[in-house]
Amino acid sequence: MTFILNDEEQMLRDSAKSFLKQTSPVSALRKLRDDKDPVGYSASVWSSMAEMGWCGVLVEEDHGGVDLGYTAAGLLLQEMGRTLCASPFLPTAVLSASALRLAGSDAQKSAWLPKIASGEAVIAFAVDEKARHNPDRIDTKAIKDGNGFRLSGEKRFVSCAMGADAFIVAARTEDGRINLFLVDADAAGVERTARRTLDSHVPADIRFDDVKLDGDALLNGAEDSETAYRHVLDAGRACLAAESLGVAEEAFDLTIDYIKEREQFGQPIGSFQGLQHRAAHLYSEMELARTLVMKALRALDETPSQAPLWCAAAKAKATEVSRLAGSEGIQMYGGVGMTDEYDIGLYYKRAQAAGEFLGDDSWGAGQVARLSGY
């Protein structure tokens, strides 16, 4: 396992950096926020991502994808974190594509993976039912009804759900096991309520009121549905950790640039030893987060059996470091760091919100202790 990017990965990262700076700078997020965009992301940017092959990064070539793996997906999200790009990439191209690959039937894969790869479909992944992440607390029920099911329950803060064509929903069947179901977003009994979060994203709460599903709505292509479900969540954590790392990196760069320019007592404040110590500490923490994120992504690609531990560790550390980078940035900016005029506050807000999705640093630390036997 190597932590050094190969030539193909470096080219992908460089092209992503260039593309996102041009099409999705921080000003684009501000516009989505100020316009109160109903879905919270740009459909044109999503289409451009599809044209570049990003949407198919985890889709096999037989289904129209490029199948570059989780390391590539993480590199893309890391650059999205740097520009605060709001897109359905994580819920659709990572979580839902992974769920279909791991648990979908051949028919489901043939029907949906090409649509994901082409950017034609947006699929939201609905798991959490309370304010905090708990993958074991699934009260949504899928009750057998003839050849199909009846789905009832509620999901909270489902990312990109307002613009989704379908949902992949975690629900308990009558045997008590967690299974995944593919649900049409416009099905009778599905109700979406938009929620605008502090990071200017637009997730949704979803209510499923006795929704009638055909038998083929169940993702039944995996030997063990719960194992597949948990692997999908691990993949999401590692890739979200990569985005949080990008948030931290850009917040750090913005802060360093600012303290080099701002003067006090006739000299740049970056020359003050106190700020240098804080910057050095943050830099070292970012290096640790960077190593853990790459370890988790490589493990997903090369040694999946080892991935749960590293994905939890990467998510916990990247959450902690991104929040530290945002708060330290605001502190070093001084009073102006609290104003909307400067972007540093937007990075702080994204770090806070992303940190809660799929488990915060405290949850991740608990998982690391459990998985490592401590």
Image: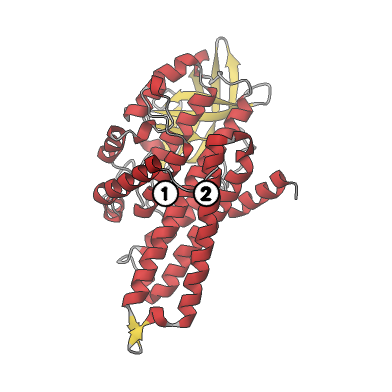
Name the residue tied to disc 1.
78
- Amino acid of disc 1: Gln
Which of the two discs, 2 and 1, labels the residue nearer the N terminus? 1
Residue extending farthest top: 146
Q: How many marks?
A: 2
Q: Residue furthest right?
A: 374
Judge from the rendering whether residue 262 lies leftward or rightward of residue 216; answer left or right.
Answer: left
Instruction: Describe the element under mark 2 as helix, strand or loop.
Output: helix
Q: Identify which residue, 319 or 346, lies in the foreground.
A: 319
- Which residue is painted at 58% across and 23% down in the image? 142
The answer to whether residue 265 is above or below residue 354 is below
* Residue found at x 49% / y 71%: 280
Residue 293, label in figure: 2
Please provide percent x and percent y for residue 315: 55, 49
Under tag 1, what secondary structure?
helix
For label 2, the crowd category at 10 Å Cα-Cα, with few meaning under 14, some 14 to 19 and many 20 or more, is many
Q: Residue at x 34, y 75 (%)?
A: 260
Q: CA distance from mark 2 to mark 1?
A: 10 Å
Query: Which colour style is shown?
Result: secondary structure
